Amino acid sequence: MMRWLPHPVVSLGLCVLWLLLNQSLSPGHLLLGILLGIAVPLLSRRLLPLGYPRMRTPRAMLRLLVMATVEIVRSCFNVSRIILSGNKRKVNAQFILVPLTIRDPYGLAMLSCLITMTPGTVWVEILPERYELSMHVLDLHDAQWWIDTIKNRYERPLITIFEPEDDHGHPA
């Protein structure tokens, strides 16, 4: 059974998404949703060489997404104010470096999405020699605030969500 449904949660999610998008529970749409739920994970296995990520604490993921949504909305207003303001004040656009602790590739991908989805910030690259994130901030007032925000609001929960624990219950 696991051979046809290697990731049943993903398959169920795809089927439900198909039914929601089509707003129909007709037998044809139900059958097509089931077929998509089976076929897509089977056909996309090679695109995920590390397999699907294992989330250890889905509740922490939900808290992180709520917190990120609030930050994204706040940043939308700030960037809109900068763009639409009538005064010609100087914008302090700069690059900053954020030291990273997280090593999980899925956690890093999620961190890059969260940073890049936040208006006024862009994930540039990870500097491998010091394992630091280079990011661009549209209007930088306090670099340490950004470092603390990335480390505490985003990276720490992502470590809890994605990285395995050692023998003492701490992320490895």
Image (cartoon, rainbow, N blue to C red):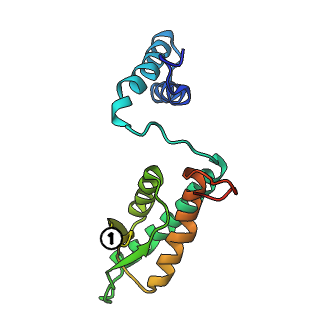
Of 26 and 7, the residue lying toward us: 7
- Give how far across and how far down residue 92 sits, in percent: 33, 85
Q: Is residue 5 left or right of residue 42?
A: right
Residue 120 seen from this side: no
* Quadrant in which the N terminus is drawn: top right
Q: Quadrant of residue 63?
A: bottom right
Would residue 57 be seen by someone viewing this image from the given angle?
Answer: yes
Secondary structure, mark 1, is loop
Residue placed furthest toward the front? 167
Identify the residue position indicated by label 1 in the image: 129
Along the line of sight, the residue nearer the viewer: 41 or 31: 41
The amino acid type found where label 1 is placed reads Glu
Residue shown at 46% from the left, 86% from the top: 142
Count of numbered badges drawn on the protein: 1
Q: Position of residue 5 (x, y in %)?
A: 50, 20
- Residue 4 coordinates in the image, percent (x, y): 47, 16
Locate the C terminus by quadrant.
Answer: bottom right
Residue depicted at 45% across the width and 49% down the height: 106
Kindly identify the residue that appears in the image at 42 percent across and 40 percent down.
50
Q: Residues within 10 Å of mark 1 (few under 14, many from 20)?
A: few
Furthest residue toward right: 168
* In this view, 55 is above or below 138: above
Q: Which sits in the foreground, 65 or 104?
A: 104
Residue 147 screen position, x and y as percent: 48, 77
Determine whether, in the image, residue 168 is placed left or right of residue 33: right
Out of 119 and 53, give the one closest to the viewer.
Answer: 53
